[in-house]
Amino acid sequence: MAVRVELIPEVVGDLEKVKQTGRLKEFLVKLVRLEEEGAAVGEPLGHRGGTNLTGWRKIVVGDRNWRIVFQMTSPDVALVGVIGDRADAECYLDLAERVGGGRTSQTLSLAAGLTSLFAAKKPPKRKKGG
């Protein structure tokens, strides 16, 4: 069953950090798998890092230190709330803050998030002879 992957706006910043590590491809592979398989790719979360994340699921990426945390908002829509390092439960705390702030009401598609990620501002071209 195909699933539409949506991102909260802060996840684009998370992807920018991942891009800087040179590991973006690993995350994109997992996000495409989420699109293809839905909730089956993630493990359920409960109480993590002093927060209640029941209803959210995690996908382990790479060396088991990275997480993609998402929630199925309907049978065919997965909302990604955070992508990050699990060190000291940092990503879970970030997610709890984002969810608590009600920032999950505005989302963008995975395609739109990737477009903004790669639409980096390029320096203007130099004019010849000038």
Image (cartoon, rainbow, N blue to C red):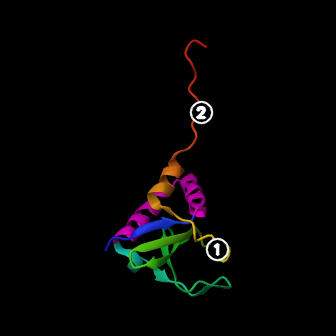
The image quadrant of residue 75 is bottom left
**Which one is nearer the viewer's eye here, 7 or 88?**
7
Disc 2 marks which amino acid?
Pro
In the figure, is residue 4 to the left or right of 70? left
Label 2 – label 1 distance at C-alpha? 36 Å
Q: Position of residue 59 (x, y in %)?
A: 48, 74
Q: Position of residue 45 (x, y in %)?
A: 54, 84
Q: Residues within 10 Å of mark 2 (few under 14, many from 20)?
A: few
Which residue shows up at 38% across the image and 75% down it?
Answer: 76
Disc 1 marks which amino acid?
Gly
> Residue tagged by mark 2?
123
Q: How many marks?
A: 2
Secondary structure at numbered mark 1: loop
Q: Earlier in the sequence, mark 2 or mark 1?
A: 1
Q: Which label is found at residue 47?
A: none
**Which one is nearer the viewer's eye here, 50 or 107?**
107
Residue stretch rendered in magenta on the structure? 9-36
Say which of marks 2 and 1 sits in front: 1
> Residue tagged by mark 1?
102
Q: Residues within 10 Å of mark 1 (few under 14, many from 20)?
A: few
Is most of the magenta stretch helix, strand or loop? helix
